[in-house]
Image (cartoon, helix red, strand yellow):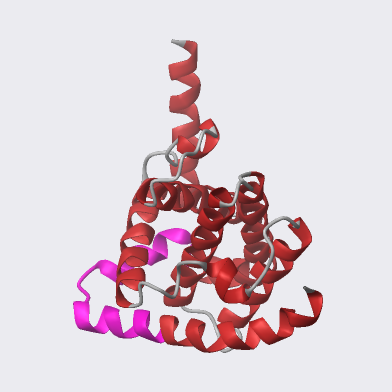
Amino acid sequence: MEVLRRSSVFAAEVMEVFDRSPTDKELVSQAKALCRDYINSRLIRAGVSWSKPEYNAPVPGGKLAEVSTILLRLGDELEYIRPNVYRNIARQLNISLHSETVVTDAFLAVAAQIFTAGITWGKVVSLYAVAAGLAVDCVRHAQPAMVHTIVDCLGEFVRKTLVTWLKRRGGWADITKCVVNTDPSLRSHWLVAAVCSFGHFLKAIFFVLLPER
């Protein structure tokens, strides 16, 4: 009963965050929870064995769970448009997955390039798709500890680059507007733009990382 009570209190606290302006720390914490959920979904889809219990647990209920569902749905669309773009990320970047520094630098380089021309929800979805694709590569290459590194890396990027933008929109719940009363063809348009941008700068990042390998 005590466990259930604590779970209920935690869920209430999470919902309270969505009823007021979230703090920077809360936005980053939510970003990482969403990332864990996204990665876990992609690991399951890829049929990759994964035994970390904290990654198997869904995000807390309420608004954050709704945000996670929508993020995954938009990610599905993004990856459906260009199925090869968000797979084999490590191979496309030609990086080793045995070095935490290399993985971190590569992910942050990709993240920075995604948002060079501004921030949109399409690009945010793209960021999560990259994180999940890279995480799948890491687990497949017997580097599961790198998943934690990727989640932390995304959280740090959100803190430095996306928090102000998120706060102006009232937090992560704003992404729900992307699928409410929206023409699917228009939604596909901004998703295609995100994919095209990612495809173009993957080559650029390859050359940036080349001297580091």
Q: Nearer the viewer, residue 143 or 73?
A: 143
Q: Is residue 156 magenta?
A: no
Q: Tell me the chief SS of the magenta region.
A: helix
Residue at 59% from the left image edge and 86% from the top image edge: 203
Q: Is residue 55 above or below residue 31?
A: above
Residue 56 appears in the figure: yes
Question: Given the current orientation, which residue lies at the most extreme top position?
Answer: 1
Q: Is residue 148 above or below residue 98?
A: above
Q: Is residue 118 above or below residue 17?
A: below
Residue at 67% from the left image edge and 59% from the top image edge: 97
Residue 154 appears at what percent x and percent y? 62, 60
Quadrant of the rendered structure where residue 182 is? Answer: bottom left
Q: Which stretch appears magenta?
A: 169-193
Q: Nearer the viewer, residue 168 or 135?
A: 135
Residue 19 appears in the figure: no
Q: Is 93 on the left or on the right of 198, as rendered? A: right
